[in-house]
Image (cartoon, grey):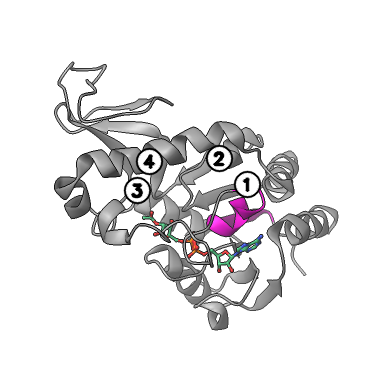
Amino acid sequence: MTKIKNIVVLTGAGISAESGIRTFRDTGGLWEDRSIEEVATPQGYAADPELVLGFYNARRAQLSTVEPNTAHTALAKLEAGLAKEGGNLTIVTQNVDDLHERAGTQNVIHMHGELLSQWCRACNQKFISADAFTTKSSCPKCDVIGKVRPDIVWFGEMPYYMDTIEVAVTNCDLFVSIGTSGAVYPAAGYVQMARGLGKQTLEINLEPSEGSAFFHDTRLGKAGDLVPIWVDEILSA
Ligand code: OAD
């Protein structure tokens, strides 16, 4: 077997579940009290910006109460281990938390945006802030009031870094999906792209995802248990 040097890992809410951040589609998921239309669409924001800003303020405030888990730290170890051998790990995450970065991973692509990034619709500039925002908040870049929204990709909006992700998938030896239901495209389609390009593919998830049949291999269980084992296998191969 040829040595695996370049890996793309796609992560979803399941990798942060053991850190205490609720997933979207499991029982007790984030949308339990709020519909997707209310809090994750441009229309929902236009209809009730205060509600939507408050929803993301709560998610942002939660970041300071949670820590990366063993799955996040194992991926940081994988990144360092591959780099030592001239390889590369690209983490493409659908998550808007910062747990990959806090685990020490450098190369993280947030395709659905980030809780800590804010976007001013008046001046179109983005800025990092852990603060809470209301419709009375002003933009620190242009001082306009009431135009700062979360830098989160809502349904109906284009995910970020699609070109960069396609290049990473094209150049990888192995594509791995961790903790995602495979319900939301385009992320859910990357396994098919990888398969079409002849890449090896692996899924690590609590249960088979919607796209499970597309993977060569599926390992079922908690990411916090399975990811460290898989990382050790790769680094010792
Ligand atoms: P989901 O909530 O749809 O799926 C989470 C997946 O993680 C499920 O398949 C669970 O079985 C699995 N899971 C739960 N706990 C786990 C654990 N400890 N270890 C391993 N797997 C576990 O979340 P995503 O697939 O990330 O989009 O959702 C994709 C997108 O839908 C999100 O990025 C968000 C949402 O709407 C936007 O906000 C644009």
Residue at x 52% of width, y 37% of height = 62
- Secondary-structure class at tag 1: strand
Q: Residue at x 45, y 36 (%)?
A: 60
Q: Are marks 3 and 1 in contact (CB under 8 Å)?
A: no
Q: Nearer the viewer, mark 4 or mark 3?
A: 4
The amino acid pointed to by label 2 is Asn
Q: Quadrant of residue 76?
A: top right
Instruction: Name the residue nearer the viewer: 138 or 8.
Output: 138
Q: Are marks 2 and 1 in contact (CB under 8 Å)?
A: yes
Q: How far is the residue under mark 2 from the one under mark 4?
A: 24 Å
Q: Is residue 220 magenta?
A: no
Do the CB atoms of the residues marked 2 and 4 lie less than 8 Å apart?
no
Q: Residue furthest front?
A: 33
> Label 4 amino acid?
Tyr
Question: Considering the numbered disc 2 on the image, is that residue within a helix, a strand or a loop?
Answer: loop
- Residue pointed to by mark 1: 88
**Which callout, 2 or 4, points at the residue further toward the start of the chain?**
4
Task: Reply above or below: 3 against 118.
Answer: below
- The alpha-carbon separation of the residues under discs 4 and 3 comes to 19 Å
Nearer the observer, disc 3 or disc 1? 3
Using the numbered discs, state the Cα–Cα distance from disc 1 to disc 4 in whole angstroms: 33 Å
Indicate which disc, 1 or 4, sits on the residue closer to the N terminus: 4
Q: Which quarter of the rendering shows the C terminus? A: bottom right
> Is residue 120 rendered to the left or right of residue 212?
left
User: Considering only vertical position in the picture, is 224 above or below 145?
Assistant: below
Q: Height in image: 235 above or below 187? A: above
Tell me where the magenta segment starts and ends, as one range: 5-20
Q: Which residue is mark 4?
A: 56
